[in-house]
Image (cartoon, rainbow, N blue to C red):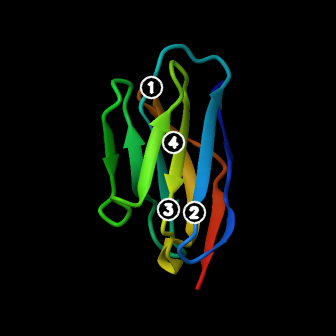
Amino acid sequence: QVQLVESGGGLVQSGGSLRLSCAASGRISGLWPMGWYRQFPGKERELVAAIIPNGIVRYADSVEGRSTISREKAKNTVHLQMNSLKPEDTAVYYCNIKYLQRNLWGQGTQVTVSS
């Protein structure tokens, strides 16, 4: 069973930075696409950033230029560095891995940006 363990959320002031981390554990071999999504109250989950095994990354327009997703070498462990945070970035952030045609999710971590 594959599980995703997230860390790094919290409260930060507007303009500040946070680094979210996510590690896949369990019986998993090889590298798989991973990403971070976020969910606002009453809204559907939306992509923030994603990275595939060959290193290609993709960002939502709303975070482009302010965020960087990276993967630890040869691991299903990713980090999302978010800078210049805004109150509108406040949401629950979820780690995702697309493993064997399944979408697996972490438990979610709250990010709150105060104005």
Residue 6 picture location, percent across and down:
66, 45
Q: Report the quarter where the C terminus lies.
A: bottom right
Q: Which residue is mark 4?
A: 96
Residue position marked by numbered label 1 in the rendering: 32
10 Å crowding of disc 4: few (<14), some (14-19), many (20+) = many
> Left or right: where does residue 61 sit relative to residue 4?
left
Q: How far apart in space, not on screen, are marks 3 and 4 (Cα)?
A: 21 Å
Q: Is residue 91 above or below residue 98?
A: below
Q: Which residue is mark 3?
A: 83
- The residue located at (63%, 72%) in the rendering is 112
Residue found 53% across the figure and 79% down from its top: 87
Point out the frontmost of discs 3 and 1.
3
Residue indicated by mark 2: 17
- Tell me if label 4 and label 2 are in contact, CB under 8 Å: no
Label 2 close to label 3 by CB (< 8 Å): yes
Q: Amino acid at mark 2?
A: Ser
Tell me how far mark 4 sits from mark 1, CA to CA: 10 Å
The disc, 3 or 4, on the residue closer to the chain's N-terminal end is 3
